[in-house]
Image: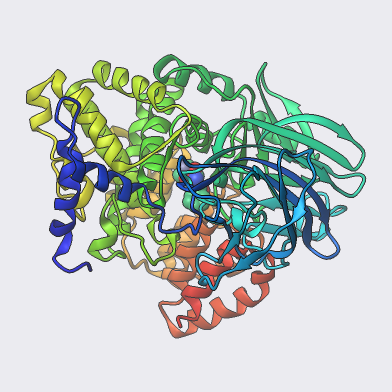
């Protein structure tokens, strides 16, 4: 932990907390605010020379598993920045073939010298480019490496159709630099256009507006300024089904009908969000369902959420994930975390909004259930995290930003906002949030900026409510140091009673599980005692068909129970699960459970050896770390 604990650090932030509108903002605050905005995970120098538009021209080569072509960057120089200051870009594993520069994308570009710096294994390497004084255009000719962390190249066997290959990108948090050279920081917003050359017969989609489509060639533009982690591409055998006037779904042909059924409420979700938090500013909202190796549940790529097929439960029970990714169209994509230490501004806000959407579309019971489960997941996460990592405004300098991507950002962040809502009342808090999205639209902001907003615009409305909120404890302290209201759910209380009945010997079939939702099943499985005798495991399985469940959330939770209790009849299902689903959230708890015994560790390694080639580089990195600690 940091010397002096969080207090020393909290003092640093106290300036930001104190500097509301009306206070004189001193020079110290300005220095602090600037330091806060510095991104420890980018080599870029946007304060001096800044990229503001990118023109991509890329060939997608499935044989070599590389993208190659060029990226033309339009740049601006900060006021008074001298001509000999180079442009500095991020890159990781890119093979740079040459760089030219000049005036205007159509103008004559001449070769310019560049230097690739030393870099490090987390951030990659800086590219410094010396430019002529008048240059505003830089073209980098390059190719990606087959190990690019953002790219997953799938052979036909790993697709639903088994006929054609598939490629998708995952740029958040700092993987964009593994497939294009740019200033890869969420504090730098760009517009872009892209031309993609793909093998005939494949469809390319981007998180952008389609402009042109011919066999083998696709063109896109993104006219709203976005951070680099939202640049996204997928290529495969894709079909489209409309859902509503501005919504639709892309997936492999054999999956698209099921997906269209699952996501039927998407338009309603958009309307519910707009009514509370202001207009949807991105035009269309489509969802792309990826093959099962997609390492996340969802990714909020603008206009086109990327989603795991494991949410296609057949009963719409897992669509809170759509609410979540949609909510990022406000919190994250419109108002963006300026650095990865502000990640909770993206995810905490989004979980809060997600539950508001679920409440509006499916009713308060379902939202309460999600909140209770979320708090449980947070407390569970705390048991694995050192105090320094239990802090919303986490210090990630010198570390992998992935270390900050825990339930703390999501659930502690959401709990903080729920507490603000409780203290100030929904009416006032909604008005505050709506205004926040309007004022910061298309901006990247820091934790300090948000706290400044609270002090300036919400706290003055009700001094008594303000007195109940301990900002320093929320933002800088580990654990749950500030007072909060524990979410409750009558339905989950009833599930707890069923667990108690079962524990005290009642037969599974006598429990009232008839109308249980996916979430109630999850709660039931999580609340079971830590050790269960074999006959009782078999009894549960016989009564509820748990090993045979297709719902991936329920299956993953049951398999955890099965591994913990050495329940062999689930072995085959476990192996099938781990070798066909690559979503990291499911993999990690299962492998963690397995390696608790020497025998389980051997099994984990055997399964992983087979599964690893199928997992995404992001999942591979996490599982590698877990299974062979170095
Ligand atoms: N933006 C995240 C996914 C992400 C986080 C990608 C960090 C890379 C680094 C996305 O919005 C998300 O939070 N997805 C969750 C699902 C959600 C319902 C909590 C996931 O993938 O599990
Ligand atoms: Zn999210």
The color scheme shown is: rainbow
Q: In this view, does 617 lie above or below 212?
A: below
Q: Residue at x 62, y 31 (%)?
A: 303
- Residue 514 against residue 567 in the figure, above or below: above
Image check: 619 left or right of 160?
Answer: left
Q: In which quarter of the image is residue 314?
A: top right
Q: In this view, does 225 lie above or below 399?
A: above
Image side of residue 442 versus residue 397, left or right: right
Say if residue 237 shows up in the picture: no
Q: Where is residue 224 in the image (x, y as percent from the top left)?
A: 59, 29
Image vertical order of residue 22 relative to residue 71, above or below:
above
As rendered, which of 520 and 30 lies closer to the eye? 30
**In this image, 180 relative to 372: left or right?**
right
Name the spot of residue 574 as percent of width and height, x first.
57, 65
Residue 426 location (% of width, % of height): 26, 20
Quarter of the rendering containing residue 230: top right
- Give the left or right position of residue 91, taking residue 317 as reference: right
Q: Identify the residue at image location x=31%, y=57%.
A: 380
Instruction: Using the image as rendered, state which of residue 415 and residue 521 is in the foreground.
Output: 415
């Amino acid at each position: 932990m940091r010397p002096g604990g969080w207090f020393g650090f909290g003092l640093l932030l106290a300036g930001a907390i104190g500097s509301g509108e009306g206070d004189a903002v001193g020079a110290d605050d300005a220095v602090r605010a600037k330091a806060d905005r510095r991104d420890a995970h980018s080599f870029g120098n946007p304060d001096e020379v800044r990229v503001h538009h990118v023109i991509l021209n890329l060939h997608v080569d499935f044989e070599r598993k590389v993208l190659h072509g060029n990226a033309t960057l339009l740049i601006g120089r900060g006021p008074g920045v001298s001509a000999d200051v180079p442009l500095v870009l991020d890159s990781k594993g890119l093979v740079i073939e040459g760089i030219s520069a000049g005036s205007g994308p159509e103008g004559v570009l001449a070769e310019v010298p560049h230097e690739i710096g030393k870099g490090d294994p987390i951030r990659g390497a800086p590219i410094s480019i010396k430019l002529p004084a008048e240059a505003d255009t830089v073209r980098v000719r390059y190719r990606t490496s087959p190990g690019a962390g953002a790219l997953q190249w799938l052979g036909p066997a790993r697709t639903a159709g088994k006929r054609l290959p598939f490629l998708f990108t995952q740029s958040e948090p700092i993987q964009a630099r593994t497939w294009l050279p740019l200033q890869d920081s969420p504090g730098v917003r760009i517009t872009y256009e892209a031309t993609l050359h793909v093998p005939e017969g494949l469809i390319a989609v981007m998180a952008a507006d389609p402009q042109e489509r011919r066999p083998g060639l696709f063109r896109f533009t993104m006219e709203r300024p976005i951070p680099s982690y939202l640049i996204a591409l997928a290529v495969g055998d894709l079909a489209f089904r409309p859902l509503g006037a501005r919504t639709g779904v892309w997936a492999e042909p054999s999956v698209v009908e099921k997906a269209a059924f699952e996501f039927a409420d998407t338009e309603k979700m958009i309307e519910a969000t707009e009514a509370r938090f202001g207009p949807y500013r991105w035009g269309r909202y489509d969802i792309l369902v990826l093959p099962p190796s997609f390492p996340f549940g969802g990714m909020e790529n603008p206009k086109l959420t990327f989603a795991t097929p494991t949410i296609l439960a057949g009963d719409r029970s897992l669509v809170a994930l759509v609410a979540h990714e949609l909510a990022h169209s406000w919190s994250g994509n419109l108002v963006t975390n300026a650095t990865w230490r502000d990640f909770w501004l993206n995810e905490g806000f989004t979980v809060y909004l997600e539950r508001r959407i679920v409440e509006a579309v499916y009713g308060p019971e379902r939202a309460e259930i999600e909140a209770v489960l979320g708090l449980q997941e947070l407390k569970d996460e705390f048991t694995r995290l050192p105090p320094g990592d239990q802090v919303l405004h986490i210090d990630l300098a010198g570390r992998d930003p992935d270390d900050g991507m825990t339930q703390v950002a999501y659930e502690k962040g959401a709990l903080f906002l729920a507490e603000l809502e409780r203290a100030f009342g929904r009416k006032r808090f909604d008005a505050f949030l709506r205004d926040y999205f309007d004022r910061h639209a298309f901006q990247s902001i820091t934790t300090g900026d948000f706290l400044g907003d609270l002090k300036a615009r919400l706290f003055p409305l009700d001094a008594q409510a303000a007195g109940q909120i301990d900002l320093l404890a929320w933002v800088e302290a580990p654990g749950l140091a500030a007072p909060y209201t524990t979410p409750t759910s009558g339905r989950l209380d009833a599930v707890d009673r069923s667990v108690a009945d079962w524990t005290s010997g009642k037969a599974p079939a006598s429990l009232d599980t008839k109308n249980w939702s996916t979430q109630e099943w999850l709660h039931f499985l999580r609340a079971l005692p830590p050790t269960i005798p074999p006959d009782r495991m078999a009894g549960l399985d016989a009564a509820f068909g748990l090993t045979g469940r297709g719902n991936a959330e329920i299956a993953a939770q049951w398999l955890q129970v099965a591994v913990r209790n050495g329940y062999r009849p689930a072995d085959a299902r476990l192996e099938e699960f781990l070798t066909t689903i690559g979503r990291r959230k499911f993999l990690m708890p299962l492998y963690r459970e397995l390696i608790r015994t020497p025998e389980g560790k051997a099994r984990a390694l055997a399964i992983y050896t087979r599964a690893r080639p199928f997992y995404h580089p992001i999942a591979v990195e996490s599982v590698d770390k877990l299974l062979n600690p170095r």
